[in-house]
Image (cartoon, rainbow, N blue to C red):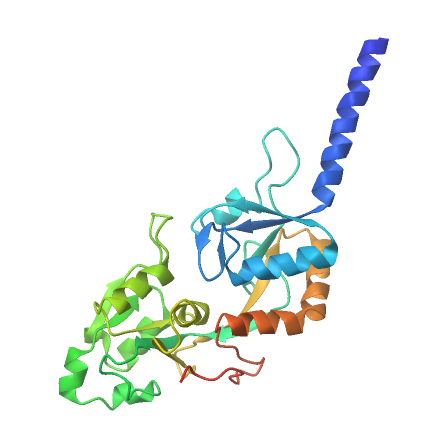
Amino acid sequence: MMTKTGLISAGFAWLLTAVAAQAAGDAFKVCADPNNPPYSDQKGGGFENKIAELFAKELDKKLVYTWFPQRMGFIRNTLKAKEPDSEEYKCDVVMGLPAGYDQAATTKPYYRSTYALVYVRKKGWDDIHSAAHLDALSPDRKAKLRIAMFDGSPATTWLLKHKLVEQGVPYQSMTADATINTAQTLEKELLAGKIDMAIVWGPMAGYLVHHNKPGTFAMIPMQSEEGVRFDFPMSMGVRIPDKARKEQLEALIDKKAADIEVLLKKYHVPLLDKDGKLLTPAEE
C-alpha cells in the first residue's frame, strides 16, 4: 500500500509531467541551423526565422528553437531526437526542406525558387544580362572568367554543357566546419575578386543582394533547360506520422501566403509560380 508521502510524491511527479506537457503544447518548436543565412541564425535574422515568428504569433505560442548545423545528421539530431530521459521530441518543425524530402513529411510548397547567376558590379562584367551572354563571350574574355563551381550542383552540369567548366573554381557545398556558411564564403570571395561569378540557389543569391549596399551585386535568375533543372519547390517538414501538425502548417501557409511572399521578396529571393514563370525580376 502506498504511504501518504508516496502519494504526495507521485502526485507531484504527475504535476511536473502535466506542466511540462502543457509547456510543450504552448510552444512552436523549430529545428534550425544557428548559422545559416539567409535561412536562419541565432539572432533571428533569417527569413525562416521570420516565418516561424509569424506562425508562432498566429498560433499564440512561444517560439522555441533547437539549434543544430543543417548538415549530415540534422534530422536525426533534431526532428527525430527526444529530450534526455523523456518521450518529448526536441523540436517539431523544419522551416525549409525540398518538397518530397524523404526523411520527413513535407507540406505543400510555400515557395518555388531557382538558381541565379550573381556577380559584383563594376568589375568588368556589367554587360552580362542573361546566362546566354556567357556563351557569347569572346575567347579572350572567356579565358579570364572565374566562376564558382560546386559539387553536386545543377550549375556544374550547366557549366559542363556550355563548355565553361575550365573557368570553374571548385568549392565545397558543405564543409565539416559549422561556422562556415556557403553564402558568407561566396560573399567574401566575390568582393575580394577571387572569383567573378557564381551560380547558386536563389535564396543564397538573394542574400548577396540583400546583405550588401544596393547595387553591389547583379542577380540573374537561371532558367531550366533540357538536361538541367534549376527551379525547385520548397516546403516545411514534420515527422512522418505527424499528420495533424502537417495539416496545421498547410493551413497557416495558405492563410499567411501574402505575408510569406512579402518576406521572401524583402530577402530578394527569386520566386517562380507553379508553372515556372518568374515572379520577381533580376536585380538591375
Q: Residue at x 41, y 66 (%)?
A: 211
Q: Position of residue 4 (x, y in %)?
A: 86, 10
Say whether residue 39 is left or right of residue 125.
right
Establish if 208 lies above or below 35. Answer: below
Task: Point out the image quarter for the C terminus.
Answer: bottom left
Q: Quadrant of residue 51?
A: bottom right
Q: Farthest residue toward the left?
A: 140
Say whether residue 60 is left or right of residue 127.
right
Establish if 225 lies above or below 208. Answer: below
Establish if 56 lies above or below 195. Answer: above
Q: Position of residue 249 (x, y in %)?
A: 68, 60
Q: Quadrant of residue 243?
A: bottom right
Between 160 and 150, the residue placed more toward the observer is: 150
Say whether residue 205 is left or right of residue 24.
left
Q: Quadrant of residue 181?
A: bottom left
Q: Residue at x 75, y 33 (%)?
A: 19
Q: Farthest residue toward the front?
A: 213
Q: Position of residue 107 (x, y in %)?
A: 64, 63
The answer to whether residue 160 shows anywhere in this view is: yes
Q: Position of residue 236 (x, y in %)?
A: 59, 60
Say whether residue 270 is left or right of residue 62.
left
Task: Point out the image quarter for the N terminus.
Answer: top right
Q: Residue at x 58, y 80 (%)?
A: 274
The answer to whether residue 2 shows anywhere in this view is: no
Between 253 and 98, the residue placed more toward the observer is: 253
Picture mark count: 0
Between 43 and 251, the residue placed more toward the observer is: 43
Q: Residue at x 48, y 76 (%)?
A: 270
Between 103 and 117, the residue placed more toward the observer is: 117
